[in-house]
Image: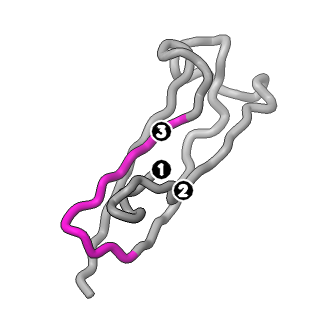
């Protein structure tokens, strides 16, 4: 995940995670392709930062090497809390 919290609003990484599917035999097919199962279903994390600009951009991405029809990831449950100092 990147936020526009860098110098002059540039996008900077604030959270990353690496996941390797080591044991495909114990995975569960939930995305519709029985050749590939899923073994990890969530990665909760918390980011806290001081930000004084009027806006903040959030960007999620992946380094999946597969094409658009072979590799997928999803984002859900995003919550943003603001506090004025």
Residue matched to label 2 = 15
Name the spot of residue 26 as percent of width and height, x first: 76, 28
Residue matched to label 1 = 1
Name the spot of residue 73 as percent of width and height, x first: 50, 32
The residue shown at (41%, 53%) is 11
Question: Which residue occupies the foreground of this view, 32 or 16?
Answer: 16
Asked whether the beta carbons under mark 1 and mark 2 sit within 8 Å of each other, the answer is: yes
Work out which quarter of the rendered image holds the C terminus and state it.
Answer: bottom left
Q: What stretch is highlighted in magenta?
A: 50-62
Asked if residue 24 lies left or right of residue 52, the reply is: right
The residue shown at (40%, 65%) is 7
User: Which badge, 1 or 2, is on the more N-terminal residue?
Assistant: 1
In space, the residues marked 1 and 2 are separated at their CA atoms by 5 Å
Label number found at residue 61: 3
Name the spot of residue 58 as percent of width and height, x first: 35, 51
User: Of helix, strand and loop, which one carries label 2?
Assistant: loop
Q: Quadrant of residue 53?
A: bottom left
Question: Which residue occupies the foreground of this view, 49 or 20?
Answer: 49
User: Which badge, 2 or 3, is on the more N-terminal residue?
Assistant: 2
The residue shown at (76%, 24%) is 24
Q: How many labels does the image show?
A: 3
Asked if residue 78 lies left or right of residue 31, the reply is: left
Q: How is the structure coloured here?
A: one colour
In space, the residues marked 2 and 3 are separated at their CA atoms by 11 Å
> Mark 1: few, some, or many residues within 10 Å (few <14, many ≥20)?
some
Name the spot of residue 35 as percent of width and height, x first: 67, 11
In space, the residues marked 1 and 3 are separated at their CA atoms by 7 Å
Residue at the extreme front: 8
């Amino acid at each position: 995940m990147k936020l526009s919290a860098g110098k002059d609003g540039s996008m900077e990484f604030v959270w990353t995670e690496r996941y390797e599917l080591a044991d495909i035999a114990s995975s569960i097919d939930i995305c519709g392709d029985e050749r590939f199962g899923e073994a990890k279903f969530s990665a909760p994390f918390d980011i806290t930062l001081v930000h004084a600009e009027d806006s903040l951009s959030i960007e999620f991405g992946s380094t999946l090497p597969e094409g658009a029809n072979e590799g997928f990831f999803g984002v859900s449950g995003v919550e943003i809390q603001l506090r004025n100092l």
